[in-house]
């Protein structure tokens, strides 16, 4: 890793004196569903930082969020085994050959964990005496102050800071300014972990790519992707759209109706259509899979259609995938095959039943051995692993691939034009000035 490519004002864990110190480290281990680890990739990515802390004589207190235990309507926080850190702890103990302790706190049935109280003292004593190698706090989103906007947030941040001598942020995928990712750094000497540094260096390859640059963006809603979509449009030589984002674009371009696409989003997409009329950056996937139902790949209820047949005023059912033969079209294959940088934040189809378009796309990317291929975020990476396991496995040891741990983080950085405007990163820069 070449730290020369980082902002010189970013405080690095390599420069921290950790010997004998308690180190509070925020990671992104949000990989648990229904109590089980779905894919340990993000945990594995944080292991070099954890090893570094242990090797330097630091005593780690680890924390992550898992899932969304807070009910948006009521504000109630549910602390269930399905969103606990237990499976993560077992995995880390096995990988690092260490003993970790998860402290228990009183849980309010509506408010979750009120804060860090004296319940943690026995765990801190065991850590101090070396009876355990580290502490892993419960799911940070179980704590009432983690996602709060006011006094509770500040109180929780101070409670976290009171546990340690040093703070390390290695949670690139957790870009929201919550207590454990942002506010705590105001109260402790703070540093960027090794994964955070690696992600920032590789993000520069998206923000300042080697040309030709091809990007692919998809999503379930058009309006949520507008700002990063327009920002990345300005950088690319060619853009491949997928999912509802692409369906919305097609409705606006051809004046057709596709089930599931809102009129308001179609109006918004007309600006992109106009923008592309002259620049012609968007690579059209002409062959699409239309389905009568979202219930699955039901025989007789899906078919391939073509944009060549679109006529103004026509209506279609659910368009749930790009037909693989779209990627054989000369302009599509040419764009992917000649690119020097490819960035993907996209699943083409409505998985798990409609994944053949994504599968063809990912395999076609793999054939381009010259390009730097970067995947952004959990869903995209999970689909690569599910649909193209051989590509995924070989890519883990291939310098021409890079897998980011947070898709939303990358899109936010693209929208801002820099990763150093992300609030948790900004907080680290501010920490160094103190």
Image (cartoon, rainbow, N blue to C red):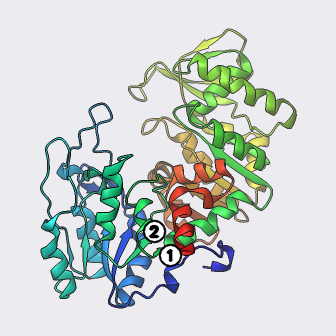
Q: Quadrant of the rendered structure where residue 369 is?
A: bottom right
Residue 2 visible to the viewer: no
Camera-side residue: 163 or 95?
Answer: 163
> Does the CB distance between marks 1 and 2 fall below 8 Å?
yes
For image coordinates 27% across by 57% down, the residue present is: 139
On residue 170, the disc is 2
Q: Where residue 43 appears, x then y in whole percent?
A: 38, 67
Q: Quadrant of the N terminus?
A: bottom right
Above-or-below relation of 18 to 295: below
Q: Is residue 390 left or right of residue 29?
A: right
Residue 363 visible to the viewer: yes
Q: Is residue 325 left or right of residue 14?
A: right
Helix, strand or loop at mark 1: helix
Q: Is residue 82 left or right of residue 14?
A: left
Label 1 crowd bin: few (<14), some (14–19), many (20+), radius 10 Å = many
Q: Where residue 26 appears, x then y in whole percent?
A: 39, 66
Q: Residue furthest right?
A: 278
> How many labels sit on residues?
2
For image coordinates 37% across by 60% down, the residue present is: 180
Q: Where residue 288 appears, x then y in whole percent?
A: 61, 29
Which residue does the numbered mark 1 point to in the structure image? Answer: 194
For image coordinates 59% across by 71% down, the residue present is: 398
Camera-side residue: 283 or 417?
Answer: 417
Q: Residue furthest top?
A: 313
Q: Is residue 417 left or right of residue 200?
A: right
Q: Where residue 406 appears, x then y in whole percent?
A: 50, 55
């Amino acid at each position: 890793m070449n730290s020369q490519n980082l902002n010189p004002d970013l405080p690095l864990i390599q420069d921290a004196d950790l010997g004998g110190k308690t180190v509070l480290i925020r990671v992104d281990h949000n990989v648990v569903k229904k109590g089980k680890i779905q894919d340990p990739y993000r945990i594995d990515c944080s292991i070099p930082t954890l090893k570094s802390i242990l090797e330097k004589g630091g005593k780690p207190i680890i924390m992550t969020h898992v899932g969304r235990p807070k009910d948006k309507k009521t504000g109630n926080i549910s602390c269930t085994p399905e969103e606990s850190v237990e499976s993560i702890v077992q995995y880390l103990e096995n990988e690092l050959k260490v003993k970790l302790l998860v402290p228990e706190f009183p849980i309010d049935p509506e408010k979750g964990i009120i804060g860090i109280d004296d319940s943690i003292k026995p765990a801190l004593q065991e850590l101090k005496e070396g009876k355990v190698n580290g502490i892993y706090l419960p799911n940070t989103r179980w704590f009432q102050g983690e996602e709060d906007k006011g006094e509770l947030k500040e109180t929780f941040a101070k409670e976290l800071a009171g546990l340690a001598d040093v703070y390390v942020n290695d949670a690139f995928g957790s870009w929201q300014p919550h207590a454990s990712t942002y506010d705590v750094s105001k109260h402790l000497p703070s540093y960027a972990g090794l994964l955070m540094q690696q992600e920032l260096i590789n993000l520069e390859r998206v923000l300042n790519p080697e040309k030709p640059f091809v990007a692919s963006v998809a999503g379930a809603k058009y309006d949520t992707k507008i700002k990063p979509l327009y920002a990345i449009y300005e950088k690319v030589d060619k853009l491949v759209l997928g999912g509802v984002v692409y369906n919305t674009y097609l409705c606006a371009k051809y004046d057709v109706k596709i089930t599931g696409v809102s009129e308001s989003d179609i109006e918004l997409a007309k600006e992109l259509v106009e923008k592309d009329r002259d620049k012609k950056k968007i690579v059209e996937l002409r062959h699409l899979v239309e389905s009568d139902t979202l219930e699955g790949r039901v025989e007789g209820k899906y078919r391939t259609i073509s944009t060549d047949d679109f006529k103004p005023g026509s209506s279609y059912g659910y368009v749930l995938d790009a037909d693989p033969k779209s990627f054989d079209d000369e302009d599509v294959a040419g764009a992917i095959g000649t690119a020097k940088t490819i960035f993907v934040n996209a699943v083409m189809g409505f998985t798990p039943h409609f994944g053949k378009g994504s599968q063809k796309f990912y395999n076609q990317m793999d054939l381009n051995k010259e390009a730097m291929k970067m995947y952004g975020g959990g869903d995209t990476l999970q689909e690569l692993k599910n649909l193209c396991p051989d590509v995924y496995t070989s890519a883990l040891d291939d310098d021409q691939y890079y897998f980011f741990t947070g898709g939303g983080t990358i899109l936010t950085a693209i929208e801002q034009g820099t990763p150093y405007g992300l609030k948790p990163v900004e907080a680290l820069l501010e920490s160094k000035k103190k």
